[in-house]
Amino acid sequence: MDKVLSGIRPTGFLHLGNYFGALRNFIKMQQENDCYFFIADYHSLTTHPTPTDLRSNVKNVLIDYLAAGLDPEKATIYIQSDLPEVCELSLLLSMNVYVGELQRVSSFKEKVRRQPNNVNAGLLSYPILMAADILVHRADKVPVGKDQEQHLEMTRDFAQRFNHIYGVDYFKLPVAYNFGQELVKIPGLDGSTKMSKSDNENSCVYLSDTPEVIKKKVMKAVTDSGPTEPNQPKPQAIENLFALMRAVSAPETVQFFEGEYNECRIRYGDMKKQLAADMTAFIAPIHERIMELRSNDEYLRKVIRNGAERAHASAAPTVRDVREIIGIKPL
Ligand code: TRP
């Protein structure tokens, strides 16, 4: 069975874009693989969250993932900072990583542009920590989006370099886990092509939103005055509404509104009401679980304690081996 690993940024509440992006695939992945999912709280320190925000973001992400169907019986779910082996491996790997190659990483350059007043060393060494996350479990596959491909490539470089320097065949080189065509891109309610919290909070529908909030957000979605000729291509904002509908509504519903649009009869108010209702129904079972989990700290603690134990069992032998290979041994 393949060992598959993924880090989850603790960004707080999850929205439908997250769900149809990675999350839904994680749920499928855990059936056929030995999966490790962890919340990357060390990584998130590079942006200096307050202790209160860090804590609640970690908790909310954990709750949303569990509620959506990550199963602690099937996958190992843990918090990065519960696995100290990662820090040690990261330190050991860093000795063979060059500052120049870190400075050339595009995510680093992007951060320098975005937060010029906080170019901390953690941002620079981010790819080393991420490589340690992966290599500490000697994972086979890592599901990565476009923005993380370079990091995975660096992980392979570091692994190969380690093998080369010490003349061993110790680390296997992790490859990308391919989702195939199953990544459904969810647009925002504000006319943007991607539902994203960093752009506009109101363009996102969260798994934890109440039906009232969902309705309010959807009714405010950007539209236009409607088509004037039959069978015209749709402007982006309208196409977005249809894309959202295709994700959560029955095919007949989508077909009905397609027909209305093509015959210039479309009433966006009706379409949005239907969309809000279908989103609410789609989210309902997840929403219910979220509410249950929020008041069940004992269960959450059990899940992460258990996860940390299993992660430790997987990671500890690696650090032991690496120390030995490097020459850190008892005198
Ligand atoms: N850098 C990843 C992100 O921003 C999160 C992450 C941290 C990760 N460590 C990882 C992903 C290891 C995959 C494997 O989304």
Image (spheres, grey):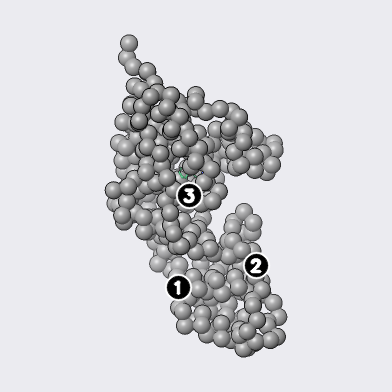
Q: Is residue 93 visible?
A: yes
Q: Position of residue 1 (x, y in %)?
A: 29, 48
Q: Position of residue 194 (x, y in %)?
A: 59, 61
The amino acid at mark 3 is: Val
Indicate if the residue with disc 3 has its beta carbon within 8 Å of ligand 1.
yes
Q: Position of residue 319 (x, y in %)?
A: 36, 28
Secondary structure category for the residue under label 2:
loop
Pointers 3 and 2 in contact (CB under 8 A)?
no
Image quadrant where residue 83 sits: top left
What residue is at 37 percent from the left and 41 percent from the top?
Answer: 139
| Disc 3 crowd, CA 10 A, few/some/many (<14, 14-19, 20+) | many
The amino acid at mark 1 is: Ala
What residue is at 58 percent from the left and 86 percent from the top?
Answer: 260
Q: Which mark is residue 191?
A: 2
What residue is at 65 percent from the left and 67 percent from the top?
Answer: 191
Secondary structure category for the residue under label 3:
loop
Instruction: Point out the frontmost of discs 1 and 3.
Output: 3
Pointers 1 and 3 in contact (CB under 8 A)?
no
Secondary structure category for the residue under label 1:
helix
Q: Which mark is residue 281?
A: 1
Q: Is residue 290 visible?
A: no
Q: Earlier in the sequence, mark 1 or mark 3?
A: 3
Say which of 274 and 300 sits in front. Answer: 274
The amino acid at mark 2 is: Gly
In the displayed structure, 199 sits above or below 112; it is: below
Separation of disc 1 and disc 2 at Cα?
Answer: 23 Å
Check disc 3 and report the residue beneath it: 144
Say which of 295 and 124 sits in front. Answer: 124
Q: Earlier in the sequence, mark 3 or mark 2?
A: 3
Instruction: Point out the frontmost of discs 3 and 2.
Output: 3
Left or right, 196 with reference to 228: left
